[in-house]
């Protein structure tokens, strides 16, 4: 049985005060949310401790947006898995296209981060996806399959979530057609030993397209940037029909 996982990626948005104000609007809207839907908020590091304290005992889990592969050391600006789990973090986004593009993450460092996250008891959300140029050149399949193969060497597929995020659809309002997103999610699943790994779609998911995306058979949830910042929008997403 595959799980449904809906995660918000707040990126570098929200102070601690903003994050707690978000919960005031968001939590009351979860009363009728079907029980089996997993809900995760991936916040900036500075909000994680207070979010995790406030959400203790609720159904909303807390995730980080990066983790280093070493448990400690001279790695200015990085954070270890143990530092995250100590404050109640259970998930972490790994290999988001913005980390790959602006901060030099490669399939090899992504692989190290995934294994370190799992070793510490975190469930990583591995992001993969092609650029517009790669799509136009007909390279989507090769690129995504390579990211999956290289990223997952030695990774435990029983503690893993994957997000298919076409880069051209992230933050652009230009959502991938749901059948096409479904096709690539199917391709990703065909590469996995564990066919029950939840595979999310990410890229301009909004209240207006969530129902259609979630109706696709290979899509098990969403990784959401912009529309996770407003409590009412994100509540509408987790309460998709
Ligand atoms: C993301 O950054 O993971 C993302 C999917 O962003 P958006 O929903 O804003 O496109």
Image (cartoon, rainbow, N blue to C red):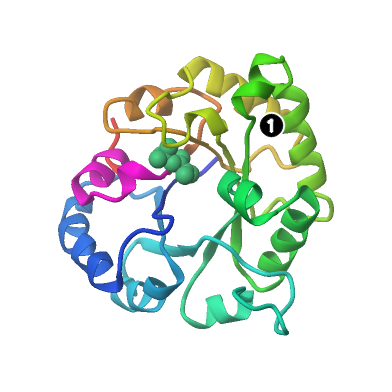
**Ligand 1 appears in which quadrant?**
top left
Q: Residue at x 62, y 29 (%)?
A: 131
Q: From this view, report whether residue 75 is shown above or below residue 152.
A: below
Q: Which residue is depicted at the point 71% across and 62% down?
A: 113
Chief secondary structure of the magenta span?
helix
Viewer can see residue 38: yes
Residue 106: percent from the left, percent from the top?
Answer: 75, 50
Residue at image location 31% in from the left, 71% down from the top:
55
Query: What is the magenta range?
Result: 224-237
Q: Is 110 located above or below residue 150 in the figure?
A: below
List the residue tagged with mark 1. 188
Q: Position of residue 52 (x, y in %)?
A: 38, 74
> What residue appears at the point 83 percent right and 55 percent down from the top-left corner?
154
Q: Residues within 10 Å of mark 1 (few under 14, many from 20)?
A: many
| Side of 165 where 73 appears, left or right | right
The quadrant the N terminus occupies is top right
């Amino acid at each position: 049985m595959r799980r449904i996982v809906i995660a918000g990626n707040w990126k570098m948005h929200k102070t601690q005060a903003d994050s707690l104000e978000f919960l005031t609007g968001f939590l009351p809207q979860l009363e009728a949310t079907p029980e089996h839907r997993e809900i995760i908020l991936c916040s900036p590091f500075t909000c994680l401790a207070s979010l995790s304290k406030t959400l203790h005992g609720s159904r909303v889990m807390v995730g980080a947006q990066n983790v280093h592969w070493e448990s400690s050391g001279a790695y200015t600006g990085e954070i270890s898995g143990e530092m995250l789990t100590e404050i109640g973090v259970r998930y972490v986004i790994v290999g988001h296209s913005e980390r790959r593009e602006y901060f030099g993450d490669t399939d090899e460092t992504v692989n190290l981060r995934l294994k370190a996250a799992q070793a510490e008891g975190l469930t990583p959300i591995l992001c993969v996806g092609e650029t517009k140029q790669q799509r136009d050149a007909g390279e989507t399949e090769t690129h995504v399959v390579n990211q999956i193969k290289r990223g997952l060497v030695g990774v435990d597929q029983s503690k893993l979530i994957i997000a298919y995020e076409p880069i051209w659809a992230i933050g652009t309002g230009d959502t991938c057609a749901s059948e096409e997103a479904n096709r690539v999610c199917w391709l990703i699943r065909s590469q996995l030993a564990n066919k029950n790994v939840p595979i999310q779609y990410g890229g301009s998911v909004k209240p207006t397209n969530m129902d259609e995306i979630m109706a696709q058979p290979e899509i098990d949830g969403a990784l959401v940037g912009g529309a996770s910042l407003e409590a009412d929008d994100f509540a509408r997403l987790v309460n998709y029909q």
